[in-house]
Every structure is written in structure tokens, then in C-alpha cells.
Image (cartoon, rainbow, N blue to C red):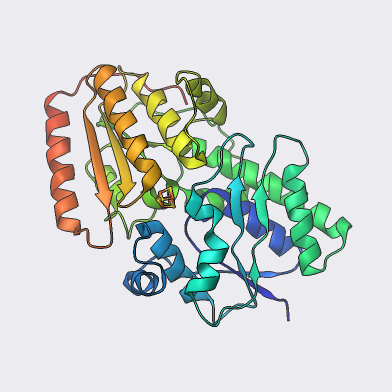
């Protein structure tokens, strides 16, 4: 029987899952995901995590609890850096320790460091170490890595083309890279809203009251951080004197600046943030000030926590959309 590796369906899952999944499956292992976030997962996370943790970390603990009795290993990498330029927030850095000391009866953790330097081989070294820990020869590891890279590249291109992560994962695995150029976008008659925030907050419908679907049902064209090419994010980074320290925070700010640089296109900017997120205190203020200074772009901050009621969020969203409709103007599609 192949060993089963459990991967919590949150946090870095939204960015890196295809890379991890394809690699592990190419080694012949069985990848098991936790269930979609639900009330039970939230309650288990609130029970297990330290009380002052942000909501995404509590949710992560809930996903660990959901998986721990049905897998041989839990994949909980220590996410340090993905670009050799910034680090993940301190909660990501301490994730394996937090999980180990908060939860009980855990299977062995695969908790190796994900620390990308800018060298060509640093990504491969992570997978080489993972393969060694699991007892696989270098040749099999190399083959699995190359296949995982191919699927991951296709996944990113599907995201640029506008698919949300889970659909992009399915397409990347079943059809490879998108046939149309990723930058091809259609004209759209509805409101054009940029929704920026960490992927585990923006794409998890349980914790954000299904915000993206509400906007789509209201006829809006929604643009997220993942629809901006990495090269464009790097260009936008030059507009600030300094980077923030944290990987996801930088991406949110740079994507926000990208959308704010296209005033003919953008109708409004929404920042989705988690209560008790330290880095977001800075990200949110920056985005608010930039929205004001770059043409008075309407800005809405949505804060979520475990006590947020869906009704309150929906009411605020509806009021925001009503205000945007009153000032809507014809525009252009953005560069992505
Ligand atoms: S960046 Fe913020 S929301 Fe994300 S894990 Fe860190 S503290 Fe929590």
C-alpha cells in the first residue's frame, strides 16, 4: 500500500499545491487533502490553536485535526522564503512548532524548510531533501520534480488567465498550459473590482462569506493578486522605497499598486484582511493611502474573523457596489 501524505487545504496550499502534489504522486505516494473549510474545521482550529492567533492560523490547525487520523505523514513545511527576497510571516516560520505543540496524536510531520534562494537549484534541493526523507532515489526524485515544475507552470498560467486556484489546478493537470495567450482578456460591461488579499483569505469561501461569488453574481469583473504576472509585480515593487518584509504582503501591495495604476479600468479596490494579522496593519494602511492619493479610488476594507457574520459583510458589500454603480465609467481592460 502506498503511504499517504496529508496536506492541509489552506495557507501556502493555494500557491504551491500543484508542485507538492504532482511531485509526491510521481513518487507513487497517495496525497490526501483536508476537507474544504467548514464549521467543524473552524471549531477544531479554535480549540487547538493559541488564542491570539489570526484566523488563518486557527483554520490551519483545524485542517490538521481533520487530517491527522487518516494519513501516514503530515506535510507541514516551514515556509521561510519563496523568492530569496522576503520571508513569509512569522506564523509561517513557526508553523511546524505551533502544530506540534498545540495538537495531540499527530502522525510524523514532514517539516523541512522551504527556503528559496535565487539560485537555479534551490527549489530542486527542497524536493531532493523531501525525497531523501521519504527514501526515494535521486533519479525518481528528479523525474518527479520536472513533472511537478511543468504542471506548476501551467497552473500559474491558468491563474493569470483568470481561473481561481482549484479550477486552475484541475486544468493544469488535465489539459496542461492554456491554449489562448494568458493575457487575453475580454471586455466586460460590469463593475471592475480588484480584490487583493492573501490567497488563503480571498479564495476560501467559508471564511469570507463567499465574497468572490457574491461579486460575480452582482455582474462584477473580479481581478485578484494572482492575475498579475510576477514580472509586473516586480515592476510595481520599484514604486516603493522599500519592500515590506513578508512575501504575501509584498505581493498584495504590489498588485494593489498595479491595479491603482490603471484608473481608467478600475472601479474599486477591496482589501480582504484577517483580524489579528500583524503584517496587514501596514498593508491595509498603505493601500488605503495609495487609493486616496492615486485618484480617489473607492476603497473597502473587509476584516474577517471567526465571529464575522455573513449578513454584515454582504450588507457592506452591497452598499459599496451601489456607490460604485453611481460613479461607473466606461473603461479599458488592464494589462496583466
Ligand atoms: S500574514 Fe497575517 S493572516 Fe497570514 S498567517 Fe501571518 S499573521 Fe496570519
Question: What residue appears at the point 54 percent right and 58 percent down from the top-left corner?
Answer: 94
Q: Position of residue 209 (x, y in %)?
A: 26, 56
Question: What residue appears at the point 30 percent right and 33 percent down from the top-left corner?
Answer: 285
The foreground one among 94 and 128 is 94
Q: Is residue 66 above or below residue 224?
A: below
- Residue 181 seen from this side: no
In the displayed structure image, the side of residue 32 where residue 150 appears, left or right: right
Q: Is residue 132 above or below residue 260?
A: below
Q: Position of residue 275 (x, y in %)?
A: 30, 52
Q: Position of residue 333 (x, y in %)?
A: 38, 22
In the displayed structure image, the side of residue 296 where residue 7 appears, left or right: right
Question: What residue appears at the point 38 percent right and 71 percent down from the top-left corner?
Answer: 41
Q: Is residue 34 above or below residue 320?
A: below
- Residue 112 seen from this side: yes
Quadrant of image for the N terminus? bottom right
Q: Is residue 43 above or below residue 268?
A: below
Amino acid at each position: 500500500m502506498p503511504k499517504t501524505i496529508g496536506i492541509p487545504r489552506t495557507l501556502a496550499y493555494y500557491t504551491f499545491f500543484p508542485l507538492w502534489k504532482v511531485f509526491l504522486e510521481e513518487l507513487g505516494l497517495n496525497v490526501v487533502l483536508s476537507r474544504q473549510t467548514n464549521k467543524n474545521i473552524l471549531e477544531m482550529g479554535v480549540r487547538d490553536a493559541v488564542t491570539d492567533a489570526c484566523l488563518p492560523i486557527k483554520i490551519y490547525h483545524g485542517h490538521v485535526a481533520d487530517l491527522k487520523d487518516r494519513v501516514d505523514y503530515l506535510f507541514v513545511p516551514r515556509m521561510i522564503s519563496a523568492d530569496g527576497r522576503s520571508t513569509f510571516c512569522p506564523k509561517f516560520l513557526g508553523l511546524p512548532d505551533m502544530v506540534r505543540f498545540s495538537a495531540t496524536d499527530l502522525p510524523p510531520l514532514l517539516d523541512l524548510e522551504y527556503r528559496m534562494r535565487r539560485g537555479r537549484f534551490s527549489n530542486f534541493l527542497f524536493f531532493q531533501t523531501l525525497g531523501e526523507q521519504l527514501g526515494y532515489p535521486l533519479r525518481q526524485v528528479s523525474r518527479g520534480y520536472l513533472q511537478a515544475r511543468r504542471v506548476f507552470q501551467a497552473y500559474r498560467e491558468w491563474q493569470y488567465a483568470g481561473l481561481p486556484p482549484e479550477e486552475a489546478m484541475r486544468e493544469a493537470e488535465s489539459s496542461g498550459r492554456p491554449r489562448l495567450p494568458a493575457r487575453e482578456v475580454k471586455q466586460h460591461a460590469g463593475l471592475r473590482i480588484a480584490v487583493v488579499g492573501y490567497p488563503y483569505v480571498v479564495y476560501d469561501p467559508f471564511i469570507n462569506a463567499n465574497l468572490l461569488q457574491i461579486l460575480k453574481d452582482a455582474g462584477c469583473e473580479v481581478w485578484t493578486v494572482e492575475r498579475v504576472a510576477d514580472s509586473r509585480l516586480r515592476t510595481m515593487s520599484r514604486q516603493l522605497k522599500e519592500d515590506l518584509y513578508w512575501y504575501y504582503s509584498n505581493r498584495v501591495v504590489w498588485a494593489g499598486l498595479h491595479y491603482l495604476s490603471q484608473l481608467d479600468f478600475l472601479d474599486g479596490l477591496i482589501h480582504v484582511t484577517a483580524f489579528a494579522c500583524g503584517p496587514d496593519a501596514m498593508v491595509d494602511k498603505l493601500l488605503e493611502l495609495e487609493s486616496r492619493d492615486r485618484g480617489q479610488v473607492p476603497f473597502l476594507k473587509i476584516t474577517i474573523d471567526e465571529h464575522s457574520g455573513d449578513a454584515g459583510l454582504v450588507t457592506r458589500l452591497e452598499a459599496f457596489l451601489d456607490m460604485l454603480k453611481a460613479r461607473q465609467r466606461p473603461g479599458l481592460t488592464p494589462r496583466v
